Amino acid sequence: MAREFWNSRFAFIMAAVGSAVGLGNVWRFPYVCYDNGGGAFLIPFFVAIFTAGIPLLILEFSVGHWARGTPPKAFKKVGAKWEWAGWLAVLIPFIVAIYYVVIMAWCFSYMIYSIDIRWGSNAERFFASFLGDTGSPLIIGGISLPVLLGLIAVWFCIFFILYKGVGRIGKVVALTVPIPTLLLIILTIRGLTLPGAMEGISYYLTPDFSKLGDVNVWLAAYAQVFFSFSLAQGIMITYASFLKKKSDLTNNAFIVALADAGTSFLAGFAVFSVVGYLAMMQGIGIDALGTQIAGPNLTFITYPTAIGLLPFAAAFFGSIFFIALLTFGIDSAFSMIEPIAASANYKWKITKAKATAIMCILGFLLSLIFATGGGLYLLEILDHFIANFGLVTIGLLECLVFGWFYKIKRLRDHANETSEILLGRWWDILIKAIIPIILVILLVVAIINNVINNPYPDYPGWLIVLMGVSPLLIITVSSFVLMKIKGKKEDEV
Amino acid sequence: MNLPLSAIIMLIFGCVVLYGGLAYFVYRALKGKKINLKGEK
């Protein structure tokens, strides 16, 4: 089977940026920034980018490029007993994709609803009715038809983009990365020209330097960087494995990281200008909006409400907002399926089209549970556990396996061989000590927060185990099972 | 309402680091001695 390669360095950078930039850049970063000291948050954020985000990106690019294969192969190259960690790294994004695609299906429907601002004056009630919201995760309810249609459309798009291999990905991202960025710029300009916009921007950027002494603000910065850069999901390892032998790994990592963070920073202006306008129109303070400025609430309630209040071209700006979200999200969504499809392709020599079809059909069937009336609540529980425990564990495993069980200097030499910016010993120290310590702290804080402050006091324990803990256990066991199943030609894994 | 001076300073700081940094690394990629953006040299 001939190895695939990116058409150009530009295609790889666009694909990696497309994977990193997603819905979280729009609905997570602006709120995290506002909630952690406003403009002062930029200081820990930049420190986290340069001490953890970029070094980890360089590690993942170097590992993929060195191993010339997907995470199972890369981990196995260090030692056969570590192959399971590679499978775990590709199963995690597959699980994330199952519910991420549901949110994209919501965006798909809302893109159509934007044409006539169908949510009217009560976006909150419309959203609940659109989901068929039962008000509880214990009452599953029926499958929402518009969400089902959106799911079919999004999963089909993912299959269509992936089944031909990275050549097609390169062509798709040449459109789906610049287009939403351009739309975000248009939305930002429109937002900044609205009355009340400066009030919103002031909330976003006015620094509260006293927060810099709070360790939680620093942890929030590291968590933001870690989740936003598509790290610890096997994606960057897989993408880097398709790079040609002579590839500048270090400079690529800097470009991807800064493009992702730059998009988040820009999104803050698009979000807070409109939030300021909404607060002014409703005669309330921005503080009163609270968590309505983040997550699905921002996207499907707060922003549509503000769009509905626009004096002219509301449908136009509503449409481009949801088109931007869809195009931001689609690159991230297919990048989550690519690692597992590529891994199956390597180990069992299943054709790429077949492996992609199997994963898309399986993903579609599993995502149906989140298209039900109780789906939103189930989605929140699963996302909480995957983000707090799954991703951090994989990040830690990467640092430990490649930092301690493999000679990290060899990876540094590998990166330096073709890169313009040369890595020094500082990189080894970051990968072997500093980043693992930060990840352990994040993990411990997450465990303490979940044990002491139950995040879901209204839900029964068995539901938390079923939707939060058991998926993590199932994929961990599955990764060992996948390691044990013999490949078609063992050397190829 | 005007933006407070401290917010303007953070705005400039953010833009210089993020977009200035991005422009610098893209420039280095375009002018790369080893490999340019097309992956050649």
Image: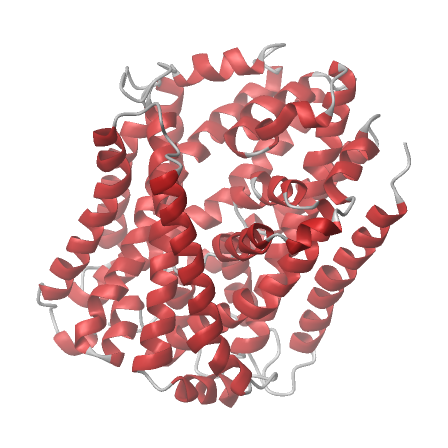
Which residue occupies the foreground of this view, A450 or A141? A450
Residue A50 is left or right of residue A436, and the answer is: right
Compared to residue A486, the image places residue A293 above or below, namely above
Residue A111 is left or right of residue A312, and the answer is: left
Q: Is residue A142 visible?
A: yes
Quadrant the C terminus of chain A occupies: bottom left
Q: Identify which residue is drawn at 57% across, 63% down.
A: A256
Tell me where residue A326 appears, x and y as whole percent.
52, 38
Which residue occupies the foreground of this view, A379 or A473? A473
Q: Is residue A243 visible?
A: no
Q: Quadrant of residue A377?
A: top left
Which residue occupies the foreground of this view, A352 or A188? A188
Q: Quadrant of residue A483?
A: bottom left
Quadrant the N terminus of chain A occupies: bottom left
Tell me where residue A443 appears, x and y as whole percent.
39, 55
Q: Identify which residue is drawn at 31% across, 68% down.
A: A70
Compared to residue A182, the image places residue A262 above or below, namely below
Q: Identify which residue is drawn at 46% across, 49% down.
A: A332
Q: Identify which residue is drawn at 78% across, 20% down.
A: A280
Tell me where residue B25 appears, x and y as whole percent.
67, 72
Tell me where residue A127 appears, x and y as whole percent.
49, 17
Residue B3 is left or right of residue A335, and the answer is: right
